[in-house]
Amino acid sequence: MSKSYCYTLGSKTYQFRDLAELMAKATPARSGDRLAGVIALSAEERAVAQMTLADVPLTTFLNDVLIPYESDEITRLIIDEHDDKAFAPIAHLTVGDFRNWLLSDHATPSVLASIRMGVTPEMAAAVSKIMRNQDLILVAKKCHVTTAFRNTIGLPGHLSTRLQPNHPTDDVNGIAASILDGLLYGSGDAVIGINPATDNVAQAIQLMNLMSDVIEKYEIPTQSCVLTHVTNTIECIEAGAPVDLVFQSIGGTEATNSSFGFNLNTLAEAQDAALSLRRGNVGNNVMYFETGQGSALSANAHHGLDQQTCEVRAYAVARKFKPLLVNTVVGFIGPEYLFDGKEITRAGLEDHFCGKLLGVPMGCDVCYTNHAEADQNDMDNLLTLLGVAGCSFIMGIPGSDDIMLNYQTTSFHDALYVRRVLGSRPAPEFEHWLTKMQIMKNANQHILNDSLPEPFARSLKALPGGGL
């Protein structure tokens, strides 16, 4: 049953008509919520909303759902799969108490893992709204989420990278050159993942075969993915293509996902199909999801909710299918949703914290579009903060510039920087391969070899012109 909330500050009483409005008004300012008309009208109103939200019992989120149970399959998923036993240790807390408990020494990594299935996305979103950036970093650092396919992702002290060799015409030579470039910088342990310029089944199969050939030829302990629509990947599997991971962009409402052309049953079918191939040799996490604040609003499917709450609801979808990787493409949609570097930084830290708290293997595409009020220094800051927070993986792209998707993200050099500064290491199986291939002279210090590894040198000499 929905109820109103009020708070008196001095002689003024603030009224919030329901939990959805309270959540929206409590959210740190961002352009998407302003566009949706749900933002707090002043800093004072935002602070009051945050104080009011801090007094809301966590049990409220189980009884007062933000989108009706009957009309949204994501709400049904959240409520039906809530674990009362896991929730019991925190069931007596308010949102503010929950924040304090998360920051306390009682909330150890093992304890946080034990309660994650009792935390709903709305609880995670609510507590994040009253946390400072340092709070988000500290708690996320304690949340360990490990997954595996051909290597192990998310171990404490490790930071993986998606090698993203996109090309504006899907030219196989250009893609292969980018893959080689990334591998020589120690990138690619999370996945070698291509966004196809031409998105159809035939093109997807061609790119899958290319990556599979490279992985098999050089015995690389990693996985590949073509980021095509989930239904295309199902067709690729049926055609006998070498599919490692199934990709899909996901949202936090049924209407958002319908606009993307899938539902939960589609994802279940794809997961079963990928598992049947048995291509993983370390684990069987076969799904790869991407998200981003603003996707529900851009699809006019946000039900009047703030964009961060919609985003965190998407992690319930991800959690259901035990993915290898989940990536918040934090600044990709544009300044209409996250206006500048400050808003992008806050959103990235929120997404990472909420995903890890819910048990999702969270990575981040530290990125911005060319018309946003942001630059590479902003991305350096967010990259460093996420590295400190224990982010599972980031992107690796030649020169930080995706020439197919036309946005700015992190480069192979950036990944090497953050590993060196923070002492983070690649996935252990991949690190061993880097040493065996003599790509790394000193893996502990992330020092690259000066010369081209002999297996790659032989392959280049076999090209027309001797690789020149």
Image (tube, grey):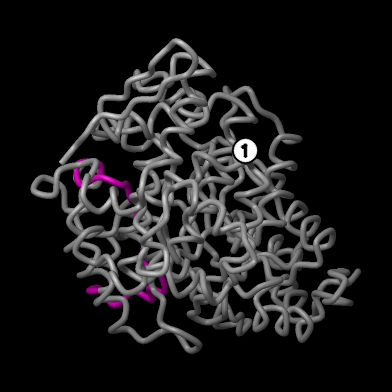
Q: Residue at x 31, y 76 (%)?
A: 274
* Residue 466: quarter of image: bottom right
The kind of residue on which mark 1 rests is Thr
Q: Residue at x 42, y 20 (%)?
A: 8
Q: Quadrant of the N terminus?
A: top left
| Residue 100 % position (x, y) | 56, 53
| Residue 415 % position (x, y) | 73, 57
Query: Exactly how many numbered labels are in the figure?
Result: 1
* Residue 84: quarter of image: bottom left
Q: Nearer the viewer, residue 93 or 202?
A: 93
Going by the image, does 197 lie left or right of 302? Answer: right
* Residue 107: quarter of image: bottom right
| Residue 416 % position (x, y) | 78, 59
Residue furthest toward the left? 70
* Magenta region, residue range: 238-256
- Is 38 within the magenta? no
Vertical side of 189 occupied by 197: above or below: above
Vertical side of 199 occupied by 368: above or below: above
Residue furthest toward the right? 450
Q: Residue under label 1, please give it.
A: 345
Vertical side of 143 occupied by 407: above or below: above
- Is 243 within the magenta? yes
Q: Residues within 10 Å of mark 1 (few under 14, many from 20)?
A: many
Q: Nearer the viewer, residue 43 or 211?
A: 43
